[in-house]
Image (cartoon, grey):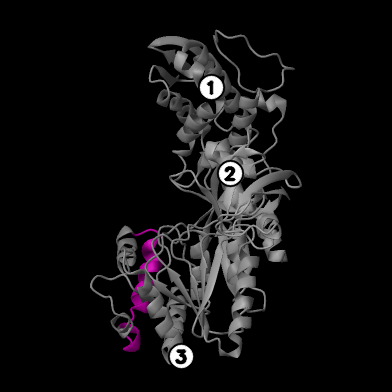
Amino acid sequence: MSSLTRRLRRSIRHSALQLSTAALLASTAVAAPTQSLPASAPPSVSEQVFAVGFGKIAEVYLDAVSFNRLGLDGLKGLSALDPAVTVERAGSTVRLYVSGALAAEYGAAPDADAGGWAALTTRVIDRARSHSPVLSKATPERLYQVVFDGITADLDGYSRYTGVQRATNERAQREGYGGVGISLDSNPNGRVTVHDIMPHSPAERAGIVDGEQLLAIDGDLTTRMTASEMRDRLRGPTGTLVTLTVARDNGAPRRLPLRRERVVPNTITYSLSGDVGIVKLDRFNATTASSLRTAVNALRQTAGPTLNGMVLDLRGNPGGLLDQAVAVADLFMRRGRIISTEGRNPESRQRFDANPDDLLDGLPLVVLVDGRSASSAEVVASALQDSGRAVVVGASSYGKGSVQTVTRLPNDGELFLTWSRIYTPAGYTLHRQGVQPTVCTSRAGQTDPDSLLSDLREGRLRAAQIASWRSKAADDEHALSALREACPWKEHEPDLDLKVAMRLLAEPALYQRAVASAVVNTVAER
């Protein structure tokens, strides 16, 4: 792992904020019908969840927050479960009503006291559950969800809470899980077949092949399991055993004991089209950069000296781990800024520059983006475009230019909080603006690669105009709208982007003109 990757991981993965018991119990009740907790009583799991979550919001969120507003809106979220429950504030008092009757009132914690508001939130919920049959039957997870939903609605569109089950699945996609390295297909007739066997996985070493039928897991028939049950049965702690019963068509069943290993979902597919390598990157997880390195090396080995360039397809890529995006861009850049980030927390202010190497040794590179390319995908596209290392083809990307920390809470749920904005090497923010392709393929009525490249051939690209809009777009809605409309994303023939990319790579002079246009755009913005 490069030192750059280690630095970025340290900056975006904080450990959960540790709060003292005294801080957790800082809130005091006024005329509260419930008995106060003894000073020596340990905080409940619920209070720990709220304390860690609230504390993290106070510590790292992009802007300074007011818990007088956030805390109250979190408690108002209880009404989503039971409309008879309402929470209001009157001066320095927080009042709980159930069916219009006052059930309790408490002294509000100070505005900046995250621990105090966590304690108060827990007390209000406990009291509300004792009066509301609906809330009394709600699981703790459901209560966490509505409270954090109420809070994060006051923050931004990317800050969110995810419950245990979803958080577990998302962690598995990002970081991997204990498993055997297979995916499953279930037919309507109940037949379960194996596909997408990961290279070097326990399943591959055991000789399992695509298309085999999975009959049983640890002796239990798969015909009696749901897809989620099969997934959960296949996964488990690394080093533990699971026995699969498999059979090939018309073959005898085989019982195969497999030892689980860490499995990270594959995010890379690649192929060779003539003398051009094509790599599709679906998302960014813990092994994306290393998998991409392997794919590019394989393409170069297969093509040999005839390799003429590469297409990096980021269309539909929603993003993922930021450290992997930095590492991916660094694979192709010999020098220069990759990204910078700015936020309220001092540790959110980072600069990341490329190491002096290039996996393609300077071979031409085209990056494909569309309106679903977001976050880490936009980091890669903008870094390669602004540095003059690649030509971006497609449509304006999504425009998610912020970094989220992920805090694992005591209940194993996760809290995502926006803590910084991303700035490209040219100095503009990706937030709302997205990446503007050098060659736009999404304008109405243009479906022929030659016509799409005519502006580039004839020197009609509006680099100066794009740069002007970018310089104003952060504060000027008219400029932002004009920028986005310059290359609006719309559904079109998927092969069109690739055809344009292949044409660019087949004409070195045209490719160099596109690179120069992007660099002029970058210089103008600076």
**The quadrant where residue 513 appears:** bottom left
**The quadrant where residue 509 appears:** bottom left
Q: Quadrant of the N terminus?
A: bottom right
In this view, the mark in front (3 or 1): 3
Residue designated by label 2: 231
Distance from label 3 to label 1 (Cα)?
68 Å
Q: Amino acid at mark 3?
A: Pro
Residue designated by label 3: 508
Distance from label 1 to label 2 (Cα)?
45 Å
Please provide percent x and percent y for residue 446. Answer: 26, 75
In this view, the mark in front (1 or 2): 2
Q: Is residue 434 left or right of residue 7?
A: left
Residue at x 41% of width, y 75% of height:
498
Q: Which residues are magenta?
A: 455-476
Query: How many other residues sit within 10 Å of disc 1, few (<14), some (14-19) or many (≥20)?
Result: many
Q: Is residue 239 left or right of residue 433?
A: right
Q: Amino acid at mark 2?
A: Arg
Residue at x 58% of width, y 84% of height:
303
Please provide percent x and percent y for residue 147. Answer: 50, 30
